[in-house]
Amino acid sequence: MQEKGLLIVLSGPSGVGKGTVRKEIFSQPDLAFEYSISMTTRAPREGEVDGVDYFFKTREEFEKLIEEGKLLEYAEFVGNYYGTPVDYVQQTLDNGKDVFLEIEVQGARQVREKFPDGLFIFLVPPSLSELKNRIVTRGTETEDVINNRMSTARDEIEMMNLYDYVVENDQVERACERIKAIVVAEHCRRERVEPRYKKMLEVD
Ligand SMILES: Nc1ncnc2c1ncn2[C@@H]1O[C@H](COP(=O)(O)OP(=O)(O)OP(=O)(O)O)[C@@H](O)[C@H]1O
Ligand SMILES: Nc1nc2c(ncn2[C@@H]2O[C@H](COP(=O)(O)O)[C@@H](O)[C@H]2O)c(=O)[nH]1
């Protein structure tokens, strides 16, 4: 029987660097994750592409997806809906591949209920002032939205004890290395050791 993949959830306050870290991890070929592209009612930012960064939906379309049970989890975050397509996640896990979700904490709680064996990682900034600096420097949000996201961030950080691991994003490369090490360790712990590691342990 084919082993199921690992469901990896990365959360953290807005602006901590989840997307940056995730893109860096996905640019490296040594860990084969599949990224689950989320649905959102948020308007696309400059340079964002439908079907690559998000599937952009109207509120009506999103509410229909909720009614039809098409979402593994969803949440309203600072005025917009965000959600994870259930079929893609389930099919990819069933095919034995690891799936990587980058979602906020309300959604992560719902995923934990459905996938208690998932791997839940919370990314933290070196400080709240650095968090604000990152979100401001990104230059994508209005002042009102930044203030809203910063006040939500304080509540989110209080939820970090619900996660299996907390990783500091002081430098992108270091945060990626920490996350990759956690995933490899989890695979070993769950005895789903990659063949190349098994080979290393073989005795002649
Ligand atoms: N380790 C880091 N040091 C300095 N700047 C960083 C670091 N990681 C990310 N950044 C910068 O911080 C900003 C926010 O990063 P990013 O968009 O990846 O955050 P996010 O957590 O995905 O945010 P959101 O939840 O709002 O989508 C970006 O401008 C990014 O370049
Ligand atoms: N619960 C979910 N949260 C999600 C999902 N996709 C993204 N997110 C999180 O929303 C906020 C805001 O994202 P932004 O792109 O507008 O900055 C951030 O914390 C994302 O991680 C999802 O499918 N479900």
Image: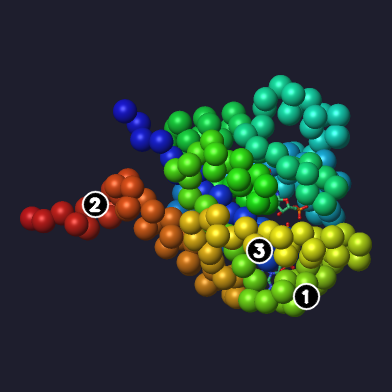
Q: Hey, which quadrant is residue 145 in on the image?
A: bottom right
Q: Position of residue 48 (x, y in %)?
A: 78, 50
Report, in whole angstroms, how far the alpha carbon at label 1 lies from the one at label 3.
Answer: 17 Å
Element carrying mark 2: helix
Q: Which residue is mark 2?
A: 198
| Badge number at residue 133 | 1
**Residue type, label 2:** Lys
Q: Which residue is mark 3?
A: 157
Element carrying mark 1: helix
**Residue type, label 1:** Asn
Instruction: Judge from the rendering whether residue 105 lies leftward or rightward of residue 90; answer left or right.
Output: right
Q: Hey, which quadrant is residue 183 in on the image?
A: bottom left
Q: Residue furthest top?
A: 68
Choose mark 1 or mark 2, whichever is in front: 1
Q: Position of residue 163 (x, y in %)?
A: 53, 56
Q: Position of residue 174 (x, y in %)?
A: 52, 72
Marks 2 and 3, the one that precedes in the sequence: 3
Q: Residue furthest left?
A: 204
Tags 1 and 3 touching, CB below 8 Å: no
